[in-house]
Image: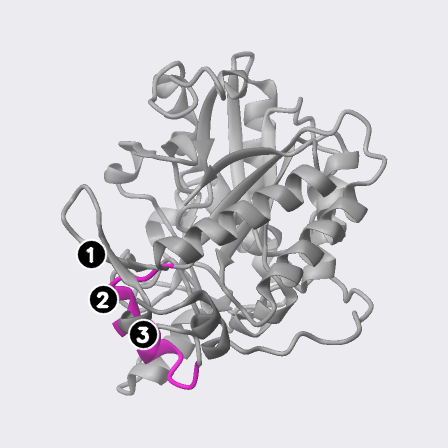
């Protein structure tokens, strides 16, 4: 079993000495937007087309409802083409049969599938079938109207004394980053309005690596949406291509909290980068600075260590052949899921050390934060 110090040496990444000024929030501009005939049967589908055309983006109306695969024989080029494509389509009936999503929330529902970012540790690798085209769903009324049947049910917050105040929770960012595509879809704003008008103990939850929060700040959310920002130590920024920088995300976190939203930090994926103790302590101090003076702060923290499966490793190596992301099974231990599949996690001593350190930093610098889970 590798030692903590040995694994840290293998991940020797140099953090920048100075912090650059925040850049404007990044807005994705896909190279292709494909629209199925079924999407155009829905008002929300037509509204998404109008948004894209107003941005001057190329819109292709398809003759059939099948999304064509990228016309690239080379897998790497096919990946690049897919990541630059947005498809407007209709969620299939299986999407309306919600699945539990522990430990985050009672239920998962999808406004879209796929993400425009280029994170070298992408959790979707191995989960999505085929090239990673981002699909946004036009049948939004059906998706949102379906949620009421699941209220009051669930086994995470609905059945937890510690998290009962959250009500029935619905996670919208399992298979996408909804803020990263919001300027083209408007789906996230519609979901926030839906939950804000829903007079019941329910909560919408989503996580983002983007910072274009301005369109959400004045929405009637009624504190029924928790906006969580996925953040990491600055030394890990090299693995998060196509996202907004940390300072922009933390700035957006403060804006959302001051607009009255419940907010959260999703610290993920936690990696033993060189000097990881100070790296994550600094991250938490920066988050505390962003939230300083927020009245009535409602803050959670979710702590997620890096792990991978054989399938996700194979996909990620194909997507990012030049990455130095640590995917060496010899430096991990195997953990079996309840389904019998294997994932590779950090050794127990390192996991214990990281957990103790991060929770201590949160208790010291962000005592308002409720740590929901460590995994």
Q: How is the image coloured?
A: one colour
Query: Mark 1 near mark 2, Cβ–Cβ under 8 Å?
Result: yes
Left or right: 188, with 349 as reference point: right
Q: x, y percentage for residue 90?
A: 35, 46
Above-or-below relation of 50 to 62: above
Q: CA distance from mark 1 to mark 2?
A: 8 Å
User: Residue 342 — which label?
Assistant: 1
Q: Secondary structure at mark 1?
A: strand
Q: Is residue 312 magenta?
A: yes
Kindly report which numbered mark, 3 or 2, lies closer to the viewer in this rendering: 3
What crowding class fits label 2: few (fewer than 14 Cα within 10 Å), some (14-19), or many (20 or more)?
some
Residue 34 seen from this side: yes
Q: Nearer the viewer, residue 36 or 350?
A: 350
Residue, x 44% and y 43% (percent of image)? 111
Location of residue 24 by image quarter: bottom right
Q: Is residue 176 visible?
A: no
Mark 2 element type: helix
Q: Secondary structure at mark 3?
A: loop
On-image quarter of the C terminus: top left
User: Residue 21, image x and y in percent?
Assistant: 82, 68
Q: Which residues are magenta?
A: 307-323
Q: Are marks 1 and 3 in contact (CB under 8 Å)?
A: no
> Residue 310's mark?
2
Front-lying residue, 69 or 43:
69
| Category of crowding for the residue at label 3, using alpha-carbon neighbours closer than 10 angstroms: few (below 14), some (14–19), many (at least 20) | few
Residue 73 colored in magenta in the image: no
Check residue 328 in the rendering and tell me which mark sits there, or answer none.
3
């Amino acid at each position: 079993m590798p030692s903590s110090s040995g694994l840290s040496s293998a991940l020797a990444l140099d953090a920048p000495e100075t912090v650059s000024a925040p850049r404007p929030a990044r807005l994705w501009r896909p190279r292709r937007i494909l629209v199925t005939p079924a999407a155009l049967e829905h008002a929300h589908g037509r509204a998404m087309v109008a948004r894209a055309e107003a941005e001057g983006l190329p819109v292709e109306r398809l003759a059939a409802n099948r999304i064509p695969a990228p016309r690239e024989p080379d897998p790497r080029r096919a990946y690049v083409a897919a990541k630059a494509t947005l498809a407007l389509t209709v969620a299939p009936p299986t999407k309306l049969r919600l699945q539990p999503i522990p430990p985050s929330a009672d239920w998962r529902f999808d406004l879209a599938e796929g993400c425009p970012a280029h994170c070298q540790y992408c959790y979707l690798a191995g989960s999505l079938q085929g090239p990673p085209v981002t699909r946004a769903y036009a049948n939004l009324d059906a998706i949102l109207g379906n949620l009421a049947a699941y209220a009051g049910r669930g086994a995470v917050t609905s059945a937890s004394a510690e998290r009962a105040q959250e009500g029935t929770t619905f996670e919208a960012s399992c298979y996408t980053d909804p803020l990263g595509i919001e300027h083209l879809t408007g789906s996230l704003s519609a979901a926030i309005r839906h939950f804000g008008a829903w007079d019941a103990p329910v909560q919408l939850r989503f996580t983002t690596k983007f910072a274009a929060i301005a369109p959400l700040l004045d929405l009637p959310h009624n504190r029924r949406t928790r906006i969580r920002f996925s953040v990491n130590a600055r030394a890990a920024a090299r693995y998060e291509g196509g996202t907004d920088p940390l300072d922009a995300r933390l700035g957006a976190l403060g804006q959302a909290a001051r607009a009255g939203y419940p907010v959260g930090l999703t610290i993920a994926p936690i990696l033993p980068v060189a000097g990881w103790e100070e790296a994550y302590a600094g991250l938490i101090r920066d988050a505390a600075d962003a939230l300083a003076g927020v009245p009535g702060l409602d803050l959670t923290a979710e702590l997620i260590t890096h792990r991978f499966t054989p399938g996700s490793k194979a996909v990620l190596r194909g997507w990012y052949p030049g990455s130095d992301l640590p995917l060496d099974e010899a430096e991990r231990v195997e953990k079996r899921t309840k389904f019998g599949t294997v994932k590779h996690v950090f050794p127990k001593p390192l996991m214990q050390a990281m957990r103790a350190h991060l929770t201590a930093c949160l208790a010291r610098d962000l005592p308002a934060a409720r740590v929901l889970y460590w995994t």
